[in-house]
């Protein structure tokens, strides 16, 4: 199992580009929770973690078919945002053990035959709706800045709690392990993130991308219900949700802390 670590966004300022935030909802893609498939902000397009469901809700019959459809879903969002796959500067790939990395690599090379985006690949124990692959991305509007922007990375859960300033924004990570149930942990986590962001001059309304680490995918709906109350329904941020490892064997408290059933990293920009 590849261990997740906190990774940070190195966001370059683009002169002359408006910082208007706009959600991107392409036809045929229905989010599995309270998040936007894409968010366009300034010179960047943030893409939520996508799986292999097609417009009819079906998955592919093979690992290769699932990877291909996942990348088609990425393409639909990128093109709805007025860009092409060539504009993708960075991506994160999460693979279930049922998808051989060699298969993903073959489809990836066919999708990006030249000038591919920078990429990190992680193993995931389980993902929402039991999808076998999930991919998120950041695209840059100015192709001339693609190489410079290739150092960008979406916030990934698993890092130390707190905030880190980056050029153009801030990344904060928190968990709510003081509560026993995932709903209450989600509320504590996002309330804590709101306080952390305010100390940096931001709010949850400035968040464009989130990464959620869930201990048990069976509690995905419970997490969604609590999570959705913290973001504007008309323009929620993008989101990637994974369970990187097997659920905690015991949920008994140790002192004043329970196992971290959910942790969240957010990227806020203005």
Image: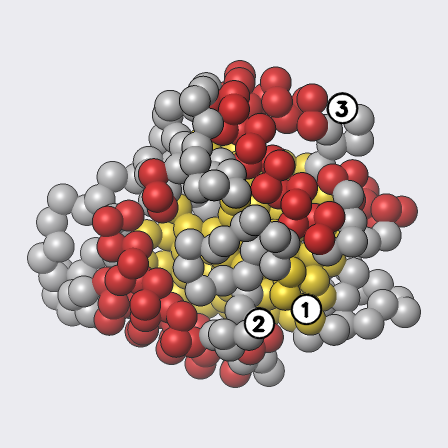
> Which-is-in-front pick, marks 3 and 2?
2
Q: Is residue 142 left or right of residue 270?
A: right
Image quadrant holding the C terminus, namely bottom right
Image quadrant holding the N terminus, namely top left
Q: Residue at x 77, y 43 (%)?
A: 84
Please, is residue 187 above or below residue 251 in the view? below
Rendered location of residue 8, percent (x, y): 59, 54
Front residue of 139/151: it is 139
The first of marks 2 and 1 along the sequence is 1
Quarter-wise, where is residue 19 in the image?
Answer: bottom right
Q: Is residue 139 left or right of residue 157?
A: right
Residue at the disc numbered 2: 235
Q: Are marks 2 and 1 in contact (CB under 8 Å)?
A: yes
Rendered location of residue 110, percent (x, y): 69, 22
Please, is residue 159 above or below residue 178 in the view? above
Q: Residue at x 59, y 42 (%)?
A: 73
Q: Residue at x 31, y 74 (%)?
A: 188
Residue 102 in view (yes/no): yes
Residue at the disc numbered 1: 22
Q: How many marks?
A: 3
Rendered location of residue 268, percent (x, y): 59, 69
Rendered location of residue 255, percent (x, y): 12, 65
The first of marks 3 and 1 along the sequence is 1
> Which-is-in-front pick, marks 3 and 1?
1
Residue at the disc numbered 3: 113
């Amino acid at each position: 199992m590849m261990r997740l670590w906190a990774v940070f966004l190195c966001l370059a300022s683009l002169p002359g580009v408006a910082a208007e935030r706009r959600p991107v909802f392409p036809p045929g893609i229905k989010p599995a929770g309270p998040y936007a498939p894409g968010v366009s902000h300034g010179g960047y397009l943030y893409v939520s973690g996508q799986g292999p469901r097609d417009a009819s809700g079906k998955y592919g019959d093979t690992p290769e078919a699932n990877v291909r459809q996942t990348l088609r879903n990425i393409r639909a969002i990128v093109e709805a945002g007025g860009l092409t796959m060539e504009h993708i500067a960075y991506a994160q790939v999460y693979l279930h053990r049922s998808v051989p990395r060699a298969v993903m690599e073959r489809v990836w090379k066919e999708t990006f035959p030249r000038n591919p985006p920078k990429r990190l690949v992680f193993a995931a124990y389980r993902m929402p709706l039991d999808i076998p692959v999930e991919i998120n991305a950041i695209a840059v509007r100015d192709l001339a800045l693609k190489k410079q922007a290739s150092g960008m990375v979406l916030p990934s859960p698993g890092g130390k709690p707190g905030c880190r300033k980056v050029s153009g924004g801030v990344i904060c990570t928190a968990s709510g392990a003081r509560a026993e149930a995932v709903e209450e942990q989600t509320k504590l986590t996002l309330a804590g993130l709101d306080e952390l962001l305010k100390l940096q001059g931001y709010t949850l309304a400035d968040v464009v991308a989130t990464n959620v680490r869930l201990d048990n995918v069976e509690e995905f709906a419970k997490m969604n219900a609590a999570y959705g109350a913290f973001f504007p329904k008309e323009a929620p941020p993008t989101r990637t949700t994974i369970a990187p490892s097997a659920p905690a064997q015991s949920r008994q408290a140790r002192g004043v802390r329970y196992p971290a059933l959910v942790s969240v990293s957010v990227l806020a920009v203005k």
